[in-house]
Structure formats: C-alpha cells, structure tokens
Image (tube, grey):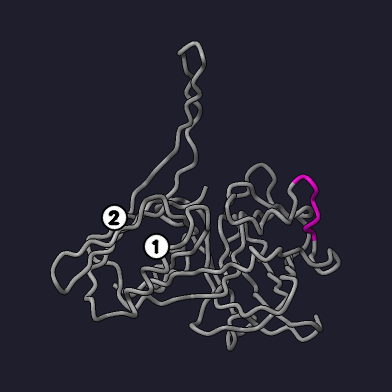
Amino acid sequence: MASWYVLTDASNDNGSAVFDAGISNGWDDTGYPVIGCLDLTRPLRQTRSNDPTPSVPILAIDLGADISIAAVTVEHTNNWGFDGIQYDQASQDGWTTYPPGVELSTTKVAASDTLDGRVKAIFIDGSSVTARYFRFAFLNTEEFPKDDPGYTYIGSLGFWETATLLTKNWGLPMRETFEQDVKVRKYDSGGSITGAASDAFVGFQVEANIHKSNTTALNEFITLAGYPKNRVIGLYKNDGDIKEVYHVHRVSTASFTETTTQYVRFQIRFSEVY
C-alpha cells in the first residue's frame, strides 16, 4: 500500500476568518454561520449556503496572513463537485488554480466514503503554495439535498501547512473500525438514561516496526505521538482516492516497545472527529 500522508499545523488554528461577503456568493446565512466551516472539531455542525439560485456557489476564505499551505481538505459536504479551487496573496485579483498546474475547468469530484458515509475531498500535489485567500467554486450538483434541495452544506475545511509523507508506512494489519458513541446520563438517585447514538465515525489502530537506525521514521512517529489529544490532524491514505482523507485526533497513549535489540514497535489509535 502507498505511504500515508499526515497533515498537521492547520492554519485554522491561527484565527482564520471568512473573507468579505461580497466575494462569497450566497454564504451569509446566520442560521448556519459560515465561520463554522473553519472549526475542525465539529464537522457535523455544517455551514450552509443561504441562496440556492447561484449556478456556481462561491465560498471565499481569508487566512489572515500569507501562509504556506501544503494541502486543503473538504469534510462532510453534500456537494460532490468542484468547479475549481483558487488561491491568492494580498491583491485578491490574481487568482491561481489550486493545486498549481490543474486547469480550473477540470471538475474535481468528491465522493462518499464507504466507512463513514461522509462526502470528502483532498487537494494535494506534494508541494506548497503561499496564500492568504482561498475561494471554492462548487457545482450545483448536490446528491444529498436534505430538506432544502439546491443548498450546499460544508462540515469543515482544512488548510494544512504541513503534509508529511511517512518515511515508514503503517504495518499490516492496519485496523479501521466502524464506531458510534452513545452518551449515558447518570442520575444521583442511581438511575440513568441512554441517549441517541452519534453518527458513524472511523477509528484507526495502527502500528509500525521501525529499525533503530531509521532515525527519520522514528522522529516522524515521535512527533505524531506528541500531538495533544485535542489537536485535530489529517490522515490521507494516498491511494489515489481523494475521499479517503480523515480529520482525526489521538485517543490512546502512543507507545514505543523495544521488540528486539534492533527494532522498536510504535502503536497508536486515532478517532475521526464527529
């Protein structure tokens, strides 16, 4: 299998803001605040376009400063088509297609992931661009119209400053689990009530056997283990399927076990945010 990408250092953490509504065509519905799409921790609390009439709904994002971006992800949308993603620095009049070298007219198609059912996409080409502004042109081809056909929903957008192609890939078997969360409320009297189950989300239990001389791989996994449990990172399977990207956080202790005099086993578990 191809080596996975690990996406970190989301510029969303730097106080990103939505650009002037004049360039965001139909995205100022106060009931579905557009700023919500920059919250990586709540992809199920979606942003919604407020006008179903534009043939190409356009959403523009201001990252607040010129930032080096290595990958962009779209999480939990109901719109399967992109007429293009563009970026610019300070001028707002010199838009360039992202990733560079891809024709704007080339429609990029997201898809529904078989594990979690979410429509997602990643845009990455192994290089970085410096930009402050991004704008997304969505096709009006919603597959999941909910109760109001014609509107586009977005769970979250990720603007990742670092995309690390793992030097040493996960070992096999790699476990991908289908999970749901059920909250139980306990009363002082001793009784309890069980709440509704959450939407499905994906868990990953991964490990890798690393030779001690492979210091590059060891350092990559040490860095991965050091991310706080409340920090959202991205995992991209990198098999050519743009929907197989996941916004996750660490849910276990990361362990390094010396298995022989020459090898160390790294183990960690992630859960998709929901």
> What mark, if any, has residue 162 been given in the picture?
none
Looking at the picture, how far across and down is residue 61, in whole percent? 73, 68
Instruction: Please tell me how crowded label 1 is: few (under 14), some (14-19), or many (20+) other residues with Cα within 10 Å.
Output: many
Quadrant the N terminus occupies: bottom left
- Amino acid carrying label 1: it is Ala
**What residue is drawn where x is 77% and y is 62%?**
54
Q: Which residue is mark 1?
A: 225
Is the magenta region chiefly helix, strand or loop?
A: loop
Residue 126, compared with residue 113, is above or below; it is: below
Depth check: 13 or 48 in front?
13
In magenta, the rendered stretch is: 26-31
- Amino acid carrying label 2: it is Arg
Residue 48, compared with residue 165, is above or below; it is: above
Q: Nearer the viewer, mark 1 or mark 2?
A: 1
Residue 28 is one of the magenta-drawn residues = yes
Using residue 256 as the reference point, say whether residue 147 is left or right of it: right
**What residue is drawn where x is 44% and y is 50%?**
116
Using residue 232 as the reference point, say whether residue 58 is left or right of it: right
Depth check: 87 or 70 in front?
70
| Quadrant hosting residue 114 | bottom left
C-beta proximity under 8 Å, tags 1 and 2: no
Residue 116 is one of the magenta-drawn residues = no
> What mark, if any, has residue 175 been given in the picture?
2
Depth check: 173 or 139 in front?
173
Q: Residue furthest right?
A: 22
